[in-house]
Image: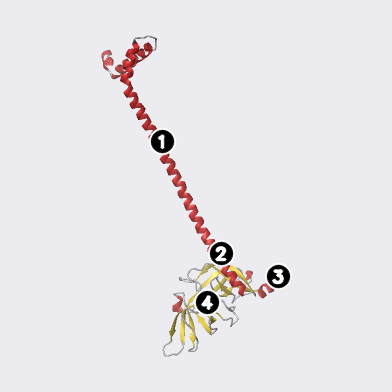
Amino acid sequence: MLRRFIKSKLFILLTVTVIVLIVMGLSSRKNSKIKYVSNVFTVVLTPFQELINYIGGQIDEASSYLKDIKALNDENEALKARIAELEDEVKELEGYKTKNDELKKALNIKHQFSDVEFLGANIIAKDMGNWFNTFTIDRGISDKISVDSTVITSNGLVGRVVSTDLISSKVVSIIDESSTVSARIAKTGNLVFVRGDLKLKEQGLCKLDNIFPDVDISVGDTIETSGLGGIYPKGITIGTVKEIRRKTNDMNRYAIIEPAVDFKRLEEVFVLIGKDNIEKAGESKDEG
């Protein structure tokens, strides 16, 4: 058993270690001849020490490199998150800008109608289909809205209120087949009628009916409300002439009107309320 231990690697390693320690201890004495032996060991071990130092340096560099990569990855993720935040902020600002532009247009319209108040409303429901030909808004009798109140956007005429309850109202737009608007050609003042059409409604368009031969009208002309009929105030933009057609076996013409309002993307509208209605409502409250 002793022979096995002597032959084992552990024994050899322990022996070498003891010898090295003895040599180091003796060489520490002054004028020791063992120093020569120590120098020999030093010469022999120096390449190994340099190799170990080199490997250690490489490990340190690799560790530092990995730390740098982790820091860069963390910074990259932080930058991505910040970019996403900035993109959301830009979208939000664009939304505010769009609403601001709409309000400016609405204010310009408001200057034309000093006898009415503008009430903003949100669309909360609409009938089946892609187009807002009939829909419901979140304003009603409690907001002084009544039947036949005019509904617009900053771009032009939407339609009118046809029924109302305490907190909501139903609106029929100018593209609905039940709608008729007394209108005029802006450049000439010629009176015409803009009507909804069952087929054209599916394209978001409406019809300008019964254009007599002596009426000057061209593609691109602006059509606006005439103020006649007692429903719509005068001068609200309805749309532009998209196409002029002639009826079969008839001298009269009709035109296809492209509304100024996009009836596929309506979200918010303004309801025009007569100031006399507001005053009456106020008087009723005072009497109550």
Answer with mark 2 or mark 4, whichever residue precedes in sequence. 2
Give the labeled residue for mark 2.
100
Residue 2 lies left or right of residue 159; in this view the side is left
Q: Which mark is residue 285?
A: 3
Answer with mark 1 or mark 2, whichever residue precedes in sequence. 1
User: Residue 73 location, x and y as percent?
Assistant: 42, 44
- Alpha carbon separation for disc pair 4 and 1: 70 Å
Residue 51 lies left or right of residue 262; in this view the side is left
Name the secondary structure under disc 2: helix
Answer with mark 2 or mark 3, whichever residue precedes in sequence. 2
Name the secondary structure under disc 4: strand
Give the number of the mark in front: 4 or 1. Answer: 1
> Is residue 138 visible from the viewing direction of this image?
no
> Is residue 87 visible from the viewing direction of this image?
yes
The residue most toward the right is 287
Amino acid type of disc 2? Asn
Closer to the camera in the image, 185 or 122 = 185
- Alpha carbon separation for disc pair 2 and 3: 34 Å
Give the labeled residue for mark 1.
64
What color scheme is it?
secondary structure
User: Residue 260 location, x and y as percent?
Assistant: 50, 74
User: Residue 69 location, x and y as percent?
Assistant: 41, 41
Please state, as top left, top right, bottom left or bottom right, where the C terminus lies in the image: bottom right
Which residue is at a point 32% across and 17% down the rendered structure image? 41
Closer to the camera in the image, 36 or 170 = 36
Q: Quadrant of residue 30?
A: top left
Give the labeled residue for mark 4.
238
Amino acid type of disc 1? Ser
Give the number of the mark in front: 2 or 4. Answer: 2
Q: Residues within 10 Å of mark 1 (few under 14, many from 20)?
A: few
Which residue is at a point 54% across and 62% down the rendered structure image? 97
